Image (tube, grey):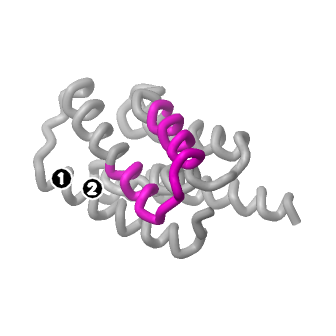
Amino acid sequence: MKNLNDAYFYLLIIVLFFIDICSLTFFEKPIIYTLLCLYAFAVFQSIGKRKLSTLVALLLLESFVFHGKFGLELLYLIPFAFMSMRARNMLYTLSIQPYILLICCLLCQTLIIEYYLLHFDISFSYTISKIIANIIVMIGISLKFRSR
């Protein structure tokens, strides 16, 4: 049964990776980050390190496809992962915590990586639409999986 759950998880992250790539070609800008939504939800779950590292590896590959530079998302993935794991151990797990992590990751992605490092021309409406679209995706993911 455990192998079936593992296969389901790996199949899910591959499908979400291709959904992100298809949304990039459809919108011509990276707006929907389904893997990041799953990552924000998975950090507050007690999943294995292998699953989390596979998810991070696909997030890095996605960053390479989107921006042409490998590893830019490590600037915020690693610090937010340590902070959220620490918060998971010290605080009560609330259903709002993955959403807060997602919004912080998206703001770091938009303001630090896209604006300051890559010099993209971003607007307020682009940032808000990115946050709202990913919150909707996060709601869909949280309907399927339950928090701890």
Q: Quadrant of residue 137?
A: bottom left
Label at residue 126: 1
Quadrant where the N terminus sits is: bottom right
Is residue 97 or residue 14 the one in the foreground?
A: 97
In terms of secondary structure, where does tag 2 sit?
A: helix
Q: Amino acid at mark 2?
A: Lys
Residue at the extreme bottom of the image, as rendered: 143
Q: Which residues are magenta?
A: 78-103
Which residue appears at 31% of the width and 63% of the height?
Answer: 133
Which residue appears at 56% of the width and 53% of the height?
Answer: 44
Q: Position of residue 148 (x, y in %)?
A: 62, 62
Alpha carbon distance from label 1 to label 2: 6 Å
The residue identified by callout 2 is 130
Mark 1 nearby-residue class (10 Å; few <14, some 14–19, many ≥20): some
Q: Position of residue 143 (x, y in %)?
A: 52, 75
Which residue appears at 50% of the width and 31% of the height?
Answer: 78
Q: Amino acid at mark 1?
A: Tyr
Asked if disc 1 and disc 2 are in contact, CB closer than 8 Å, the reply is yes
Q: Position of residue 99 (x, y in %)?
A: 39, 58
Residue 18 appears in the picture as rendered = no
Residue 97 part of the magenta-drawn span? yes
Q: Is residue 147 left or right of residue 139?
A: right
In terms of secondary structure, where does tag 1 sit?
A: helix
Q: Main secondary structure of the magenta part?
A: helix
Is residue 35 placed above or below 63 in the rendered structure? below
Is residue 127 or residue 47 the one in the foreground?
A: 47
Is residue 90 or residue 31 the one in the foreground?
A: 90
Which residue appears at 40% of the width and 49% of the height?
Answer: 101
